[in-house]
Image: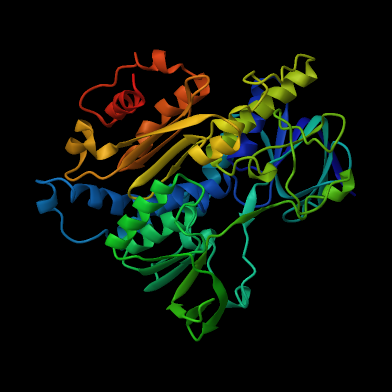
Amino acid sequence: MSENREHDVVVIGAGPVGENVADRVVRGGMTAVVVEADLVGGDCSYWACMPSKALLRPGHVLAAARRVDGAREAVTGGPDVAATLARRDRFTSRWDDAGQVEWLAGARIDLVRGHGRLAGERRVVVDTFGDGGPVTLVARHAVVLATGSVPTLPPVEGLAGARPWTTKEATSATEPPGRLVVLGGGVAGCELAQAFASLGSAVTLLEMADRLLPAYEPVAGELVAQAMREAGIDVRTGVTAASARRNGGAVVVRLRDGSEITGDELLVASGRRPRTGDLGLGAVGLQPGAWLDVDDTMAVTAVTGGWLYAAGDVNHRVLLTHQGKYQARVCGDAIVARAGGRLDPAPWGPHAATADHRAVPQVVFTDPEVAAVGLSEAQATEAGIRVRAVDYELGSVAGAALYADGYRGHARMVVDEDRRVVVGATFVGSGAGELLHAATVAVVGEIPLDRLWHAVPSYPTLSEVWLRLLEAYGL
């Protein structure tokens, strides 16, 4: 017989999104329980953001040192593989979630380990691990789905049988393969291609679009591809995989032109799908396996009554951890406010994730880094905005010359000409990620260019590029 437990809010998924939703509702005076079928902390902590950046960082540090006379002469060799992997393991807590579980307890959030699924309005049934039997969780106010997304395999003949890596296997690998073929030149594919190349793998990167990072300004993919090729990575754009097969211990990828590439491992980094196939969505009239449409409070639009929410990757608005956590904060506060009859869903208000639409910051942790916020020139034009793109070579800024000898990079500012505000910015170059928050503030705050002109950048820093962009605009 199922045990029944009541809480104000039931959250399915204890990744960073689910943790933040629960934390916000508890801070608002409610009770919360999270349900987790894997490790508390989610993919970002164990198989995505943290381990991938830990794998990248040693190679980036050595490359940065080699760009400065006086440091270059002191650097020999590449990253120590064993030490790099050991550092990665520390960042993942060696795939032990005890620390995250302790945090939940300290935040007064209950935890039920097991697989949770919807069983009707405000009801979640959990098949618990061990001998505990099923538990029915009843939500007095809301159920939040924060189950994220999982890698998906493209329709390539024989691909599943070739036993490819996804990002999960790549970020938890115990050693770098001698030869690695990467299918997909988006963010994950580019980052992991560079990480394994720095650890000694011979890497071939395949992208079906005509450039890497096709979702970004064209200059981003161009500069990243140039750097990769200079580092020995075989970058091929405009190519499509036709089939894949295991041949003994090796994997062979055949392209549409008939050529073949052989590697010891094949990493597929070409898309994700929602983790909603077994959440019991049918019990509330939703399609199992589908993305969940939500409004700006994160309430699922297809379900009436304001009791079902979906935050993070699962709603397909923005598949980024920091943006999912932003949604989680909005969602938790909206649940508390709705229960108290004081919901304010107005744009840029406390209960609306307005930034999801046109103010999303993101960093690609390649070398060079790509940092972007808001709309690209193409996206802004498509949205019907009369825009002007202003470009400046980042290496021409005095701070860049000090940062690295022969600094190579680029900056672009996208301006709404009718309102004279910045609606997008992209920076490509070493350390470019540290320029991004200033651009995010400018976009979110809709700061007029005439006022932004008075934000004086310190000299000599990379941030001087703001002055140069505004000068190039005509101020």
Quadrant position of residue 470: top left
Q: Can residue 386 be seen by looking at this rendering?
A: yes
Residue 54 against residue 317 in the figure, above or below: below
Residue 438 against residue 288 in the figure, above or below: above
Q: Quadrant of the C terminus?
A: top left
Along the viewing direction, whichever of 125 and 371 lies nearer the viewer: 371
- The residue that appears at 48% across and 21% down in the rendered structure is 421
Q: Position of residue 83 (x, y in %)?
A: 31, 57
Q: Position of residue 213 (x, y in %)?
A: 47, 52
> Is residue 356 left or right of 421 when viewed as pictured?
right
Along the viewing direction, whichever of 177 and 101 lies nearer the viewer: 177
Q: Position of residue 473 (x, y in %)?
A: 36, 25
Q: How many marks?
A: 0
Q: How is the image coloured?
A: rainbow
- The residue that appears at 19% across and 61% down in the rendered structure is 77
Q: Can residue 25 be seen by looking at this rendering?
A: no
